[in-house]
Image: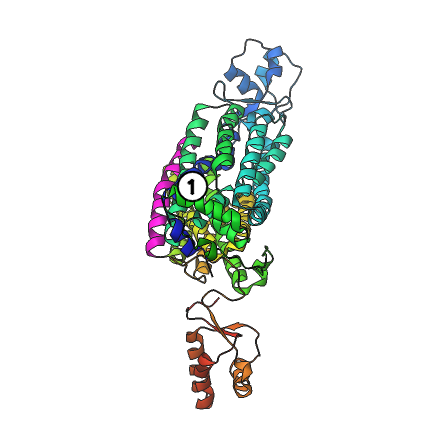
Amino acid sequence: MSRFGPILKAVGEFGLFQKLIVIAICIPGIFSPFDTISQVFIGKSFPHHCNTDWILQHGPNLTEEEQKNLTLPVNEDGNFESCKMFTPVDWNLETIERFGINSTTGCTDGWDYEAPKGGSSMLTEFDLVCDKSSFIEVSQSIYMAGIFFGVLLFGTISDRFGRRCGILLSLLLQVLFGVAVAFSPNVYVYIVLKFFCGFSSSAIMIMLSVLAIEWTVPSRAATCTALLMTFYSVGLLVLSGIAYSIRNWRIMQLVLFSPLVLVLGVFYCFLPESARWLITQGRKEEALKVLQRAAQVNGRTMPEDLLDKLEMEDSIKRRNILDIFRIPYLRKRTVIMSCIWFASSLLYYGLGLNVGSFGVNIYLTQFVFGVVEFPANFTGWVLIQRLGRRLSQAGFLIFGGVTCLIILAIPKNLPVVITTIAVLGNFGSTASFNIAYVYSAELYPTVVRNNGVGLNSMCARVAGVLAPLVRLLDVFHDTIPMLVYGIIPIVAGGLCLLLPETLNVELEDHAEMNPPGEKCRDPMKDPMKAKYFELLFGVYAQTIVFPPTALRRREATLSSTGVNSNTAALSRGLMSIPTPTLCITPDATPE
């Protein structure tokens, strides 16, 4: 149970102090998509063909078109081949024009790119075309692998050393590696640095969201997270504008990440620690200082008995990530939420990193993707306040999955229609992702909250690793990627319905063996009733959770099969047996 609610009410539930925190955490939210989505522009493809300047030794006055006609074969579509050229020969120009060249070879002297003046990408600098074209997808997947390992470490750091420590360390490493990427001498160094970029930026949104939620009441948690994710969408728009204005990828990288130095300095000076976390760690004096600061900013007077309310328990057990798997109801929540995060991420990145294949200008498409996130954030925020977290999460996952399946039915010669449907899918994935941030944080107690959400996020990063690689499956059939992107979210949406609702439920602070609010009873203390309990359920259980509806269903089954009415009636008697092992929950969805 939480002991922080009355304390927060005393110092101000959502006063100026909390509003300043929300405003502050929204600033790094703008930078969050830079690392992930900038790869769409850094690895931008340009039309290219083999460098065939060898022929200029025989005909220095050839025009570009004549040079291509004499040295490049034509594919089935009537366009010049991108990865083949005619084998260089030591003939004079007249002979080449008269007889032509029949044999072909790969590009032995590099490639020529039709890039705009001053424009460059990782693809043009490192020649990531033809047999090296998969390096783009590989770099994206390795970046996601960095996030995978980072969320686990930063979740542990945040739960062990505090939310403030985790956020500051993440920002510091993000600045260092983000700027270092701009000086990559080759693709291999670039990939290594992108791994550490993913590692450092992995949990920043999670830690910011958790900090905001822990400083506010449950009714404001969705609002705080929605604002944070809205600024993530602002970052997408800013990214599109910067990428369109700065076509050199190295300069763009410096412009994107250098301002984080200022953010890091401001946060170091002013960002407060989570008082809720300090209380769970038994750090009484530090918690009081932070709460006094909050009360002062909110214009409240610190209650004299607040010290008593903060009386710490010496026997508080320190929890870690393994407790998430030891405690049954947390284990169940973790498995289902991990599936939800995996599906949301696969859908989001499957569409977001695939904008170049929709047949429309990537700058415009990415800008539209950013714009559509604003109504997605707002719609998600409204629905989780009205319908609750569970139904909203399931609904948006299923909606996003269905749009991917619809794309398969659209002819490829209608790129605008395909892009429109993809934007709707992005709408669903964005809303689903945003709800997952709120829902996950509310499902875990404070002592393991960052570990729990971080573990869920790890599964999202596995999906992020796989999302670019799933696109490579189109070599077997071009429908496979969209089938994968569509079916998995629909399945995850169904699993979501097995979770409990958390709308306006007070956050847990400590992890207990049984779900909060559950009444535990043990029929084994009465030998006669224990015998009938074994008859009814088949086993002596140390901890078995049955909602009242399940007991009534069991009673009806026994009655219909001719079991003695006294035995059937015992299932009602179990409801009043006073001991601690049979756990009967009033919720229709048992933990």
Above/below status of 356 relative to 451: above
Which segment is the magenta one? 361-387
Residue that label 1 marks: 21
Direction front: furthest residue = 304
Point 59% across, 12% down: residue: 56
Q: Position of residue 407 (x, y in %)?
A: 41, 45
The residue located at (34%, 57%) in the rendering is 387
Give above or below for 250 relative to 302. Answer: above
Q: Secondary structure at mark 1?
A: helix
What percent of the width, then of the height, locates residue 164?
Answer: 52, 42
The front one of 131 and 320 is: 320
Amino acid type, mark 1? Ile
Q: Can you tell which quarter of the image residue 86 is in? A: top right
- What's the colour scheme? rainbow
Residue 260 relative to residue 139: left or right? left
Observer-nearest of 346 and 227: 227
61 in magenta: no
Q: Residue furthest top?
A: 61
The rendered magenta stretch, by its main secondary structure, is classed as: helix
Q: Can residue 2 be seen?
A: yes
